[in-house]
Image: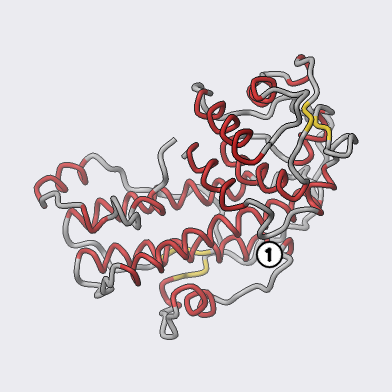
Amino acid sequence: MKKNIFATIVSITSGIHRDKRTEREFQVLDSQMDEISSSLHNQFEIQFKRPLNHKKSYYKKLIDKQTQIELAFIKEHFPSDAIEYENLYSYSLLQERIEKYLLGISNYILNENIGEEINSDLGYILNYIKISAIHLLIELQAQYGHFSEQPIFSISEIAEKYFEDTNFNEAYYKRITSLHKEKEKRLPNPKKKIKNSFGFKFKDTSKLLSVLKNLQLKVDLLQNQTTVEELHQLLTAPDFNQIDCQIYIHLETTQFSDVVSQLKPFFTNLTPTSIQNSGKFITKTGTLLKANNLYKNKVHNPKEKEEIDKIIQQLQ
């Protein structure tokens, strides 16, 4: 569950400024990395100066690899059978995720007082991760912007908003397809089965149990009639219909909606709809938790958000 490259490169404690490996060491690492060619139907491709040493080449390949993972992650969140509420929720969740990358990169450059001269190793790498993070947001907007409840920004506006860069070169991006028509008619798939699992992505579930215990300890996640172990068993079960328990939530719905959105990247099917379909979650008022409750109660800064964020970060 390692952090991805958009976070590690700009870590204050272990970021790229602390990487003191030699060019010879980077030559070995670079030779072990494959060039990334995307099979995704993206709207843009990045045009950037070729790396002229192994350190630049190695980091560029790392960033390219993570960018393709992130773009695939975006597409996974907009399945053809998703309802409008799910798409609105997914867009908001993904936008917040990308904004964290953008702000992290910007703050790193500012706080470390690092110049961005493109010819230096550090400048080259920081410029490339910067335009790669912007790429994620413009792809999200171009393909799924009709699900956004916030304004759509141009490339130059994104650079100015997150980096205070008023001279950003939009030529870094070349449009390679026409705008994707997300509302195209799709044939229904009558054979599609409803998933009866939340789909935790990792074999080792001990970190998830630890996170749930900390949420219970710090913010009272569950009511007394539900144990953390019962929730953990339900979330990791191959078929939640086989689990004979009800999960009584103590958190306010705005808080629980935030918990779900932050846990979602660690699951393949943890959504408000799957939570409703399980029929297992009971609100603080004693009613069955509905998907619409979670969508409508998603707010930017719910109570105890800082504590919840800190705990769930332990999963990374």
- Foreground: 65 or 278? 278
- Foreground: 199 or 103? 103
Q: Which residue is mark 1?
A: 145
Whether residue 258 is situated above or below residue 274 in the rendered picture: below
| Amino acid type for the residue under numbered disc 1 | Gly
Residue 101 at x, y percent in the picture? 47, 59
**Circle 1 crowding by C-alpha within 10 Å: few under 14, some 14–19, many from 20:** some
Residue 122 at x, y percent in the picture? 23, 64
Whether residue 269 is situated above or below residue 165 in the rendered picture: above
Q: Who's the residue at 71% across and 61% down the image? A: 181
Q: Who's the residue at 74% across and 21% down the image? A: 240
Question: From the viewer's perspective, is 301 left or right of 311?
Answer: right
Q: Residue furthest bottom?
A: 166
Badge 1 marks a residue whose secondary structure is: helix
Whether residue 4 is situated above or below residue 49 in the rendered picture: above
Q: In what quadrant of the picture does the N terminus appear?
A: top left
